[in-house]
Amino acid sequence: MDCLFCTIVAGEIPAEEIYRDADAIAIVDVNPQAPKHLLVLPRKHYATVTEIVDGGDEALLGHIVAVATKLARDVGSRGFRLVVNTGTDGGQTVDHVHVHVLAGRRMTWPPG
């Protein structure tokens, strides 16, 4: 498998890791879109959130969102945004589920 995030999870590519448990890791995004920009991803490979749901692993999806929320509270001074891009039209550029945690500035709407 040729997946960037799988190689990060395996420790084959260095990343600034800030969290790890049996099911998820969190890293600092190398292309930040906000003063604080983290990525929370499952250690198990799923290309999209629909794959997680279709596979019946909603608990994993809930876990990565919960981890993202806990980390966001730590870095999001007055608020934060969680984003999950899914598919090409959804803006997903790495085919491994990940939750973006954006904080450190006022977010605007619409986002894109």
Image (tube, rainbow, N blue to C red):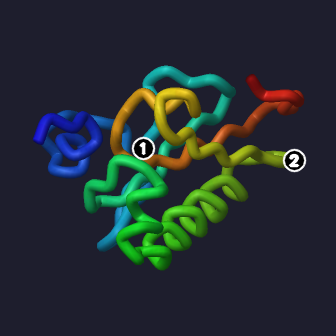
Q: Is mark 1 on a helix, strand or loop?
A: strand
- Is 43 drawn above or below residue 80 in the view shown? below
Q: What element carries label 2?
A: loop
Where residue 86 sits: x, y (%)? 52, 41
Q: Relative to 17, is 59 on the left or the right?
A: right
At label 2, the amino acid type is Arg
* Residue bearing the label numbered 1: 27
Residue pictured at 42% horizontal, 27% vertical: 93
38 or 60, nearer to the observer: 60
Q: How many labels does the image show?
A: 2
Residue 80 lies left or right of residue 99; in this view the side is right
Q: In the rendering, which numbered label is found on residue 78?
A: 2
Identity of the residue drawn at 42% across and 67% down: 54
| In the foreground, 15 or 63 | 63
Residue 46 screen position, x and y as percent: 32, 55
Q: Which residue is drawn at 42% across and 44% down?
A: 27
Q: How crowded is mark 1: few (under 14 residues within 10 Å), some or many (20 or more)?
A: some
Name which residue lies at 49% across and 67% down: 61
Three-letter code, disc 1: Ile
For the residue pair 83 and 107, the one nearer the viewer reads as 83
Q: Is residue 94 above or below residue 70?
A: above
Q: Is residue 110 left or right of residue 61?
A: right
Q: Estimate the x, y position of residue 6 in percent, counting from the top left.
A: 22, 46
User: Dividing the image into 4 quarters, which one contains the C terminus?
Assistant: top right
Q: Which mark is residue 107?
A: none
Looking at the image, which is closer to me, 23 or 36? 23
Report x, y in % for residue 9.
24, 50
Using residue 2 as the reference point, say whether residue 62 is left or right of it.
Answer: right
